[in-house]
Image (cartoon, rainbow, N blue to C red):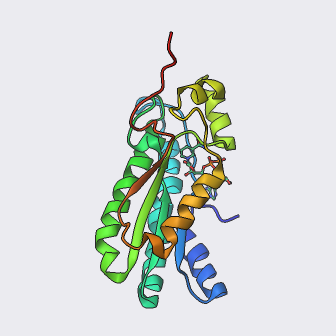
Amino acid sequence: MIDLADARCGEMIVGQASKLFGGLDVLIHNAAIGTSGTVETVPDVDFERVLDVNLMAGIRLAREAVPIMRERGGGAILFTAALAGHRYVPNAVAYAVSKAALIHLTRCMAIDHGRDGIRTNCVTPGPINTPMLHEASAVYGIPVEAMRAGMPTGHIPEPDEIAATYAFLASPAARSINGQAIGIDGGMSVGFFSPKP
Ligand SMILES: NC(=O)c1ccc[n+]([C@@H]2O[C@H](COP(=O)([O-])OP(=O)(O)OC[C@H]3O[C@@H](n4cnc5c(N)ncnc54)[C@H](O)[C@@H]3O)[C@@H](O)[C@H]2O)c1
């Protein structure tokens, strides 16, 4: 596995993939890590690792991808941000800051590279049924069932729902969608469901 915290991850991943497949049409930066804590408690080394994996890797991958896509007449760049980049859950400052920055990186790149035919979008998931969710549930002491109960749809999305959104965003059907943060959160970004007492 190539470590996304490595400053050479762009050359190693995008450069190699492009050589292997003869080009590049879609880049997805999905991997991320979290660490619990506030500005008072998260040491620089941990804060920087979260920013390296979650944000700088996206920048480094995109830096390699943009010229290749430009040369081919365009492409789609997709980042996985998070609802936490819009709405904060306490004690996760490094993760939240990295995701908020990804949302704005998406907007910046949409404008800088739109005329090259390169569309940049991100998704902002709420809870998704993956190992990260179960780890967060243990760390923050919030049972997954309580998260499910608070979701307006009463359903925690599965990873294939994220994949389907990526497939759409990368497709010609999404040719005018650029610079957007698409919530995949069952409506949590607009409100929480409270059961009747
Ligand atoms: N699961 C959720 O509830 C949730 C909510 C919002 C956003 N997200 C986002 O969805 C994306 C996918 O997360 P997930 O839930 O599948 O998390 P996960 O922890 O289950 O999986 C993360 C993946 O990232 C890889 N990874 C971690 N550090 C790496 C590194 N340095 N180099 C290369 N790979 C590395 C891991 O090997 C793993 O495959 C992330 O961007 C995450 O922030 C997840």
State the residue at coordinates (64%, 51%): 159
Towards the viewer: 21 or 155: 155
Q: Give residue 176's position: percent from left, percent from top.
A: 36, 71
Camera sees residue 8: no
Choose top left, top right, bottom left or bottom right for residue 180: bottom left
Does residue 196 appear anywhere in the picture? yes
Q: Give x and y (percent) for residue 153.
A: 54, 35
Residue at the top extreme of this rendering = 197
Seen from the viewer's position, the closer of residues 154 and 119 is 154
Image quadrant in which the N terminus is located = bottom right
Residue 81 as seen in the image, left or right of residue 116: right
Q: Nearer the viewer, residue 148 or 82?
A: 148
- Residue at 57% over, 69% down: 9
Nearer-the-camera pick, 143 or 156: 156
In the picture shown, does residue 163 fall above or below 99? below
| Rendered position, 39 above or below 119 | above
Measured as percent of width and height from the top left, residue 52 is found at 50, 55
**Which residue is depicted at the point 36% across and 66% down?**
178
Picture coordinates of residue 74, whole percent (x, y):
43, 82
